[in-house]
Amino acid sequence: MCGIAYQAVGYYYRYPDYAALTVVTSEAVLFVIIASMISYFIEKIRLGETRYRSIFEHSQLGIALFGRTDFIISQTNTRFLSMLDYSPEEVIGKPFLSLCLTSRDKERFLEKIGKSDATENFETRLATKSGAGYWVNLSWNRVDDATISCTAVNINGRKIAEKLNNDNMMKYSQLTENSPNGILLIQHDSIRFSNPSFSGLTGYGKNELAGKNLADFVDPRDKDEFIEFAKHWSEHKPVHGEKEIRFMTKNGDVRLAALTANSILHLEKPATMINIVDISEKQRLSDKIHEDNERRRGIIVTVAHELRTPLQPILGYLNLLISDPEGFGIVEDTKKILERCLVSVDRERQIINQMLDLSVLDSGKLQLSYSTFQLEPLVKSLLDTGGYLTKAEVTVDIPESVTMTADKDRIYSVIDSLLSNAVSYSKPPRKINIHYSSETDDLYHHISVKDNGIGIEQNAISSIFEPFQLADSAKLSRRYDRIGLSLSIAKKVVQMHSGDISVNSAVNTGSTFTINLPKEMKNAS
């Protein structure tokens, strides 16, 4: 356009004789110039408006224009409407304040916009069409004297996540604060959190524990063991099982606690949660029980020895008298009386020996002597020696090839005890079956002794292996002449072999006791 103007001025000076024409022509040219300039600026404005509208409509931010004094919304983009689920007709012409969720949100908005026409990062809640709260981050500034342009960033998801996290933290805090167990949060070898139970255990307050190393409160006798245990969680390795550690309290006492550790994230960084159970009282009771058992064991051993000493000469004299009744002038009736006395005295001797065996087993001082032997010859020898074949019909179902590694004499006594019980509690005609079973891939030998006896009630099975316990002690101890030690001894021996004894029984039908022994003995030498 400037080029056209210069051409018109040049034409005027080159042709002065045509002044009138030139004037007319100049006015026309000037009109054309002005019209062209107007058209140019209109086009520029149109392009600018188009560009602005494109940005306005396609912005990822919600945008709303409202009056500076009355807050009436004059224009919004699609993003703003979609956030709150409104249509343009439902928003345009209404005050922006009507979108605030609560009266408190309105007050905060008015307070903020009253201070400045330009604001950034104002977090508040707007109301959706359904009336639900929607968190947004608002920023606004003045477009002109009458209009405010406001942008809204969606932060609803973040706020919901924060609320859930706060709720979870509140629940977690309530859980830990009221937990009877001590709970610690360890990060970078320092205590970040401790609950009241741990403070109660150690006597130290929460502020006294914060930032300290847990090792500072460990009894010096357990410090090396604790440091080794703590290496796992400090290196973020899995920690399995629990560890018993003694702690020094603030007043100098010692408390025993069981520790378990789990790896967690705290503030998005690795940390360790320690669960601490005070077992001091449990340990005290356990020590007392152990002391009582040792005292009881000592009494039993002393009494057993004292009883066994006078029995030896009685047994000797009775055997001597019975072996030569004529030489001692003993008549037949007297001999029968002496034989009954011998049986009773011998039974007393067996009871005393069982009491001594049980005491040795309880003390843990019994050493097993392992050897490899065939099972079938052992059982047949036991049947012959114990005279069981004359007392019951006994069948043996043991392959000749079966060999096992164990303490032969102890396993002999275990099978002997089960056979003795089977014969004693069976009903005539007594039928006893000794059976062996084990598959190729089975890790255990299974030796079963089955009888056709009186059976055991299910609620009594768990107690028959306890010392001096019988399935029905009030009747059976008198009727079957037993005191309930043999099964207890048998089970302890089998457990020393890393095995167990299982029972399957039905009242008035019979019982099956099964010895389960591992094929490979870890302690065998």
Image (cartoon, grey):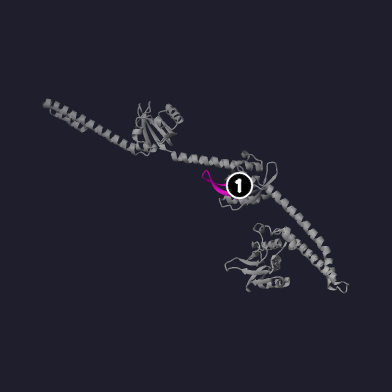
The residue depicted at 52 percent of the width and 42 percent of the height is: 168
Depicted 402 relative to depicted 301: above or below: below
Screen quadrant of the C terminus: bottom right
Point out residue 466 in the picture as x, y percentages from the top left corner: 70, 58
Segment colored magenta: 261-273
The residue depicted at 64 percent of the width and 58 percent of the height is: 458
**Main SS of residues in magenta:** strand
The residue depicted at 71 percent of the width and 49 percent of the height is: 285
Amino acid on which the number 1 mark rests in the picture: Asn
Dividing the picture into quadrants, the one containing residue 377 is bottom right
Of 491 and 431, nearer the camera is 431
Q: In the shown orientation, is residue 474 left or right of residue 268?
A: right
Dividing the picture into quadrants, the one containing residue 330 is bottom right
Point out residue 238 in the picture as x, y percentages from the top left corner: 56, 52
Dividing the picture into quadrants, the one containing residue 156 is top left
Could you classify mark 1 by the number of other residues whose Cα lies within 10 Å: few (under 14), some (14-19), or many (20 or more)? some
Circle 1 sits on which residue? Answer: 275
